[in-house]
């Protein structure tokens, strides 16, 4: 009996690998079910005409051809708006997150915890705050906080329609998004700054380095590249996910004269208002490609060379 038991007993390495597979299996199944399969289905759906009432009908690349040749809103408004929004919100929000994380690392623990919670909290309540606080601040009548202040200072003669005037909507969208952009990426960079070996700074000081700017570029950033990469990816994802902010602020989709129309709101317009799911899926594939390209650039910038 003992001999038989020894013969069927698995090697230790195999048992360890089986335990590892058991731990990763739930995540792998969830990733396959909720990420991989929907992406593949979206790609296939982008090759069809599907209005939710009739069975999908294959049109092959017609949706993509129409998107780049016949959709004037996409080419003249959505793409320029998305690039402008991403250029301002992405890099500025990312640099602001790193700068705030570095500043918080210089103060005592208790004050740092309180300030970190205050800075992080807008990212948790962005939806509620957007529909309540920001719409009150940028209200287009005299009761709006910003208009009231400008009128009292005699800087304007009549209230400005901040949320419905195409001239101002994009600027308001950028301000609100930056206010709520200090999320998980900000906390990751704060953790990265706090975990840097302080002996590196002491050694640099002995060698004659006495500038905080030099410390940031030669010690801080190189020592926390994983956190910088994670922060860049999260900033990228949150920037593209924040596309619906224009609709939430203006209360319209499409936004007034498409001034705040981004690629995400264009997807919502065709998918959930016009019910052209195949065309919306084609726009989603373009968005996926854009995110992958920016993600590749982030890995090139902050990824480990080895």
Image: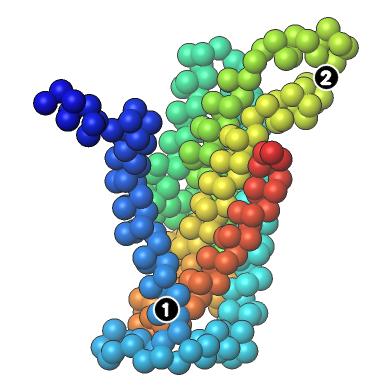
First along the sequence among labels 1 and 2: 1
Q: Which residue is pictured at 65% across the width and 34% down the height?
A: 225
Q: Say which mark, if any, is on residue 100.
A: none
- Cα separation, mark 1 vs mark 2, equals 55 Å
Counting the numbered discs, the total is 2
Percent coordinates x, y for residue 126 in the rendering: 42, 47
Q: Which residue is pictured at 63% across the width and 72% down the height?
A: 79
Q: Say which mark, if any, is on residue 44.
A: 1
Q: Is residue 240 above or below residue 166?
A: above
Which image quarter: residue 193? top right
Which image quarter: residue 125? top left
On screen, residue 259 versus residue 211, left or right, reads left
**The residue tagged with tag 2: helix, strand or loop?**
loop
Residue 153 is at least partly visible in this image: no
Q: Residues within 10 Å of mark 1 (few under 14, many from 20)?
A: some
Q: In front: 183, or 219? A: 219
């Amino acid at each position: 009996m003992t001999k038989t038991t020894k013969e069927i007993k698995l090697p230790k390495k195999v048992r360890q690998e089986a335990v590892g597979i058991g731990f990763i299996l739930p995540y792998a199944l969830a990733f396959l079910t909720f990420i991989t399969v929907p992406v593949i289905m979206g790609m296939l759906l982008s090759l069809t005409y599907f209005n939710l009432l009739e069975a999908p009908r294959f049109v092959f690349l017609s949706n993509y051809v129409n998107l780049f040749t016949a959709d004037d809103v996409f080419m003249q408004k959505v793409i320029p708006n998305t690039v402008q929004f991403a250029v301002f919100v992405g890099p500025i929000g990312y640099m602001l997150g790193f700068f705030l994380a570095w500043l918080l690392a210089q103060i005592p623990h208790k004050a740092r915890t309180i300030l970190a919670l205050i800075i992080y909290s807008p990212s948790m309540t962005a939806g509620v705050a957007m529909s309540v606080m920001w719409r009150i601040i940028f209200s287009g009548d005299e009761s709006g906080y910003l208009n009231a202040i400008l009128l009292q200072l005699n800087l304007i003669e009549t209230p400005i329609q901040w949320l419905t005037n195409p001239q101002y909507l994009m600027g308001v969208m950028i301000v609100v998004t930056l206010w709520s952009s200090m999320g998980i990426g900000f906390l990751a960079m704060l953790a990265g700054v706090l975990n840097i070996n302080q002996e590196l700074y002491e050694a640099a000081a002995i060698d004659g380095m006495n500038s905080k700017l030099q410390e940031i570029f030669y010690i801080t950033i190189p020592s926390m590249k994983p956190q910088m990469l994670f922060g860049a990816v999260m900033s990228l994802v949150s920037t593209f996910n924040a596309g619906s902010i224009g609709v939430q602020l203006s209360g319209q989709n499409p936004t007034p004269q498409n001034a705040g129309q981004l690629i995400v709101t264009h997807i919502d317009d065709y998918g959930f208002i016009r019910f052209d799911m195949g065309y919306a899926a084609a726009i989603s594939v373009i968005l996926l490609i854009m995110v992958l390209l920016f993600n590749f650039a982030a890995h090139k910038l902050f990824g480990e060379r080895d």
